[in-house]
């Protein structure tokens, strides 16, 4: 059974819960399944997001692997590097999916605290963008809060390693 952590909204499997509860894999807090709300489910196991669900913290979101990520019509997406070794650099998305990394990916940033493949930013629709940490060593942060996968919006500050990037969407 999937449950939603009441602290960070992360959803995870709760089949082996005992009296001592479970440890949320995202925020590491103890969660008792009888106190946590069940996560909304789609028959295929995908967690559905609804407008009334909290978006703070980490949200587990799945999308089929065969989806092609495209940039929305008459829209440009940028990552402005506002702090770190490449400060002042502006990266324009060539497509709807960009991998950020130290040695592998689309946006390469020479920062010792960034993993080889650190995070991925995906465009799901004209106004829906997500960032997902790729099991990095030092984590991915949105506006100062550590996340594994969450929705982002225009103006959010992404921190990977010692580098801060501003996510920017421009309608043309």
Image (cartoon, rainbow, N blue to C red):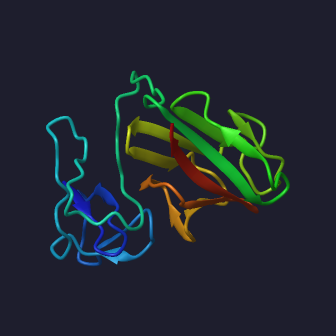
Left or right: where 11 falls relative to 29: left
Nearer to me, 154 or 49: 154
Nearer to me, 34 or 85: 85
Residue 121 in picture, x, y percent from top left: 53, 43
Residue 44 in picture, x, y percent from top left: 20, 35
Left or right: where 125 falls relative to 79: left
Quarter of the image for residue 38 reads bottom left
Check the image and report above or below for 125 versus 56.
above
The structure residue drawn at horizontal position 19% and vertical position 63%, both measured from the top left corner, is 52
Check the image and report above or below for 9 versus 149.
below
Left or right: where 30 falls relative to 14: right
Residue 31 in picture, x, y percent from top left: 30, 74
Numbered disc total: 0
Quarter of the image for residue 87 reads bottom right
Check the image and report above or below for 13 versus 67.
below
The structure residue drawn at horizontal position 50% and vertical position 48%, both measured from the top left corner, is 132
Residue 95 in picture, x, y percent from top left: 55, 28
The structure residue drawn at horizontal position 24% and vertical position 71%, both measured from the top left corner, is 18
Quarter of the image for residue 91 reads top right
Image quadrant containing the N terminus: bottom left
């Amino acid at each position: 059974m999937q449950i939603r952590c009441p602290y960070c909204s992360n959803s995870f499997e709760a089949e082996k819960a005992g009296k001592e509860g479970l440890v949320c894999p995202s925020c590491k807090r103890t969660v008792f399944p009888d106190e946590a709300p069940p996560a909304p489910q789609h028959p295929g196991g995908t967690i559905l997001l609804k407008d009334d669900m909290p978006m703070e913290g980490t949200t587990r979101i799945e999308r089929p692997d065969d989806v092609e990520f495209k940039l929305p019509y008459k829209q440009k997406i940028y990552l402005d590097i506002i702090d770190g070794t490449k400060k002042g650099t502006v990266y324009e998305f060539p497509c709807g999916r960009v991998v950020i990394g130290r040695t592998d990916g689309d946006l390469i940033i020479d920062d010792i605290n960034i993993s080889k493949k650190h995070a991925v930013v995906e465009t799901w629709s004209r106004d829906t963008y997500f960032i997902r940490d790729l099991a990095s060593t030092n984590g991915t942060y949105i506006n100062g809060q550590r996340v594994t996968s969450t929705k982002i919006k225009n103006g959010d500050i992404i921190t990977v390693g010692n580098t801060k990037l501003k996510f920017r969407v421009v309608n043309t």
